[in-house]
Structure formats: structure tokens, C-alpha cells
Image (cartoon, rainbow, N blue to C red):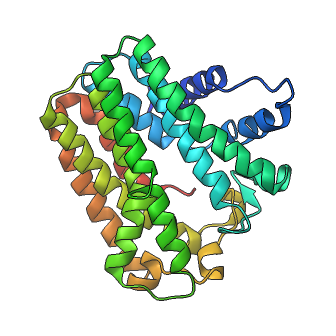
Amino acid sequence: MKYSERIEDIAKRVNEALNRFLPTAEGPQKRLFEAMRYSAMAGGKRVRPMLVLEFCRMCGGKEEQALPFACAVEMIHTYSLIHDDLPCMDDDDFRRGRPSCHVQYDEATALLAGDALLSLAFETGLCNNMQSGVLAQNALRAMGLLAKASGGQGMVGGQMIDLLSEGQHIPLELLETMHRGKTGAMIRAAAAGGCILAGADETRVQAADAYAAKLGLAFQIVDDILDVTGNSQTLGKPAGSDVGNRKSTYVTHLGLEEARRLAGRLSQEAVDCLRVFGEERAFLSDFTLRLLNRDH
């Protein structure tokens, strides 16, 4: 299967699973469920669930063991995007090429849709993981990683640093800390969680974590580059929003060329972390290096 076909196939299977796990838009909570579906089924790269599935596969696990956790990761990612777009946060009106959740519905509905997706993520990850044949201890460990990654020590903490840093030129070390939380923590939980669900040994779990830590930073640096060089139509969100919000980025710190070099070095180091997975790593290695040339 060609690279592009495989990416599309993984996204298709994740979307089908998400559609099963999300509540049907009916009943007195219909508006809430519609908003959840509107954001969760809006497409996107599905990078985080793809990492869950690929690391599970590379460790000898079955896809059905990892799909509930993969969907839980994507639900949390979607909730974070809904909340990030709110006027009290980044105040973005477009996401994935269409109106943000609070624009399509209203702020209160968007807030509740994000809350509900976060709760549903843990219901999906815990209940369905164990129903799919995953050992309870592995399901609990993976969900524990996800809880920490999405909270104050991870994604939410990174967003807090981001908000407090608007209009300031923060040190590069603080910028890295922010993105290791805001972007990197969930990517690390996805990669390590996939290994854990497959019952992998600690060497592979740690290799996946090291890979994801480097990938997360590289991913963010490329995002910063695209904010300067991309266009709104391709990105599916306003280009130049970081500049408009006077945010420190890797580009403002390093310049475009040095930022590109750093992203390239981190991507290669991430690929090197995959050696422990042998020949099974080919697709993920290809994905990692192609990351440098993405346009959205």
C-alpha cells in the first residue's frame, strides 16, 4: 500500500470508530451532541490516533486493542481545539477549514462540547479498552498516561504558559517547556500508550516515548514555520495568527532557516529512536521525515 493510501486508510478507520463512540445527535441534549460531532468529525490529520495504532502494531498488538484508546486521544485533542478557539483563549473563528465550534453554535455550547468530549474520552478509553481484550493493568496504565498528559502537567499547563506569554518575548527554554506540554505531552501519551496496550516491554515503551518527545517538538516547529509561510486556505485556520497575537515562536527566536534546520535534526533523531522496532518501523520513519514538507 502506498504511503498516501495508508495514511488515508488509517484516518478512515479512526473516523469510523469515532462515529461509533460518539453519541447520536438526538434527544434533549441534541445540540450538545451535534456540536461534539461537528468538531470531532471535521477531519484533520489524525496524527495522534495514528501513532497509537502504529506503535501497537509494531509491538505485535491488534488494531481492535488500540482503537478505543486512539479515539480517546483524538477526543481529548478535539476538546482542546474547541477550547483553544474560544474568544477567551486564542479567539480563532476557523478550524479545519470551517467555522470554529463556538462560531457555528455559541460559546456556551462549545464549552460544554469540549467538557463532554473530555469525559467521553475516559469512558471510551477505559470501558472499551478492556472490552477489546486489553489487560486491565495495561488499559489503566495507558489511561493514566493520557490523564497526566492532558492535565496541568501537560497540555493544559502548556496552554496556561501560552496565555500568560502573549505579547512577551519569552526565553527559548520556556518556549520549549510550553510546547513539550501543549503539543508534546499528548503525542508522547499516544505513542507510549500504543506500546503499553500491546503488552510491549519497557525498552520499546521508552523508545516510543523518546521518539514522540522529539516528534512533538519538530511538529510544533513546523507549525510555527507554516504560520509564517502558509496560507489560510491550505492550513484550514488563519495564517499569521501567532504573529497577530504577538506570540513567541521558534521562528521569532531562531529565524526561518534555523527553525527549519532544528526541525530536520529533531525529525532525524526521532527516526533513530525507532531502530528498536526493526523493519516494522519503515512506515513511521517515512511519516516522520515527510513531516518536514507538510503544508498544513
* Residue 5 visible in this rendered orientation of the protein: no
Is 200 left or right of 189, judged from the image as shown? left
Is 288 left or right of 200, judged from the image as shown? right
Measuring 72% from the left and 38% from the top, which residue is drawn there?
A: 36
Q: Would you place residue 160 above or below residue 200 in this image?
A: below
Measuring 84% from the left and 37% from the top, which residue is drawn there?
A: 31
* Residue 119 visible in this rendered orientation of the protein: yes
Assign the C terminus to one quadrant of the image.
bottom right
289 or 244: nearer the viewer: 244
Q: Position of residue 258 (x, y in %)?
A: 35, 78
Q: Position of residue 255 (x, y in %)?
A: 42, 83
Q: Would you place residue 65 above or below residue 157 in this image?
A: above
Assign the N terminus to one quadrant of the image.
top left
205 or 287: nearer the viewer: 205
Measuring 29% from the left and 56% from the top, which residue is drawn there?
A: 214
Q: Position of residue 24 (x, y in %)?
A: 76, 23
Is 70 left or right of 40, judged from the image as shown? left
Measuring 45% from the left and 25% from the top, which residue is drawn there?
A: 126
Q: How many marks?
A: 0
177 or 285: nearer the viewer: 177
Q: Position of residue 122 (x, y in %)?
A: 50, 32
